[in-house]
Image (cartoon, rainbow, N blue to C red):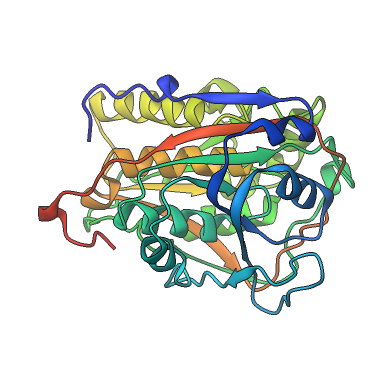
Amino acid sequence: MIKNMDYSYFNKTRYNHVEDLAGLPEYDCLISAYVSVERVKEPSGKIPCKEKWWVLEDGVSPDGFIGDAKTFHITEESDGGITKELAEKGYSRLCIDITGFVIPQLLILLRFLQIRGFCSFDVIYTEPNQYKEGEETQFTETPTYVKQILGYSGVHISDMSNDLLIVAAGYDHSRIIEVATEKKSARKVLLFGFPPCSPGMFQENILRAYQAEPAVGMDCFKNMDLNIFAPANDPFSTAQALKEYIDKALRSKAPFTNLYLSPLSSKPQALGMALYYIWEDGWKKEWSIIYPFCHKYIHDTTSGISRIWRYEVMLPEIRADQGTVL
């Protein structure tokens, strides 16, 4: 952990057109999660790279678009061999397009990259113009089960008298309810994406999140200043906002006993939550990242392509005395 870390110093670049990605330096490997939507397919055809690797969900088969490119399956317990193959090939210039990733798969891949020593790489995220169904958009179809994400399990204490749960609240209020119910006794705080990726999304987000009020509590909505706000498209601002909130909580007269983070909003905010946890050595503390896993995710929820972002991600190296940290 770096004392007084300021995540806002990390670099990000905005591109207004997919064609602009062609000007990036060539990567050894582009890793993308395959989803048959425009904002995943189009950037993959423009980013210069020697190889393209695709992460497939269970039950999804490669199609003509993927061709003969390598495919991998990230599970709840493994990165599917991605980082092992990267190391064997000696690849160092990596690009990860997180647009189509399921959040647990993304976070697991980040931790395996860190463990294998891949501590510097670029991340691409393509914003949608809008959600097709607005505030009624659904992202999952099947029941979920809340558990810690591999590599993000802390050393918790038995005292749960002042636990804190911070939920990056997205549109899917049912998943907010599941996480809040799992940590019923914890004080709840919501992290909202503001400014949002597109106009109107913040209002839609609040309307959906409000439906979780019975599980989350009225305080989060009665006094919005009690919540945390960070741009929906900025992982580094998200990490900084979490740091400032949690540092203040730790300095209070009654600091929290255990801390739980749950990334249920945009992919950049999930990335920011993971970066904060990793840089702060969360696995050595009473901190965990939890997620409502499910068996089927709905991906075709957006229309159009808005801005594209490139985030220059850095992870801390793992010292020899830290072990595998999984």
Near-viewer residue (11 or 148): 11
Q: Is residue 184 visible?
A: no
Residue 122 spot, x, y in % from top left = 51, 39
Position above or below: 16 against 290: above
Give the x, y percent position of residue 83.
Answer: 41, 62
Residue 95 place in picture, x, y as percent: 54, 46
Quarter placement of the N terminus = top left
As rendered, which of 151 and 210 lies closer to the eye? Answer: 151
Where on the picture, by quarter, is residue 315? top left
Residue 217 versus residue 307 in the image, above or below: below
Tell me, yes or no, if residue 153 can be seen here.
yes
Which image quarter holds the C terminus? bottom left
The one nearer the camera, 242 or 156, is 242
How many numbered discs, if any? 0
Q: Nearer the viewer, residue 283 or 184?
A: 283
Residue at screen point 61% across, 40% down: 124
Q: Is residue 134 left or right of residue 232?
A: right
Q: Is residue 2 above or below residue 56?
A: above
Seen as rendered, the residue at the extreme left is 321
Q: Looking at the rendering, which quadrant does residue 231 occupy?
A: top right
Q: Position of residue 227 (x, y in %)?
A: 53, 28
Position of 60 with respect to 54 (left or right) is right
Q: Residue at x 41, y 63 (%)?
A: 89
At x 46% / y 58%, what residue is drawn?
A: 109
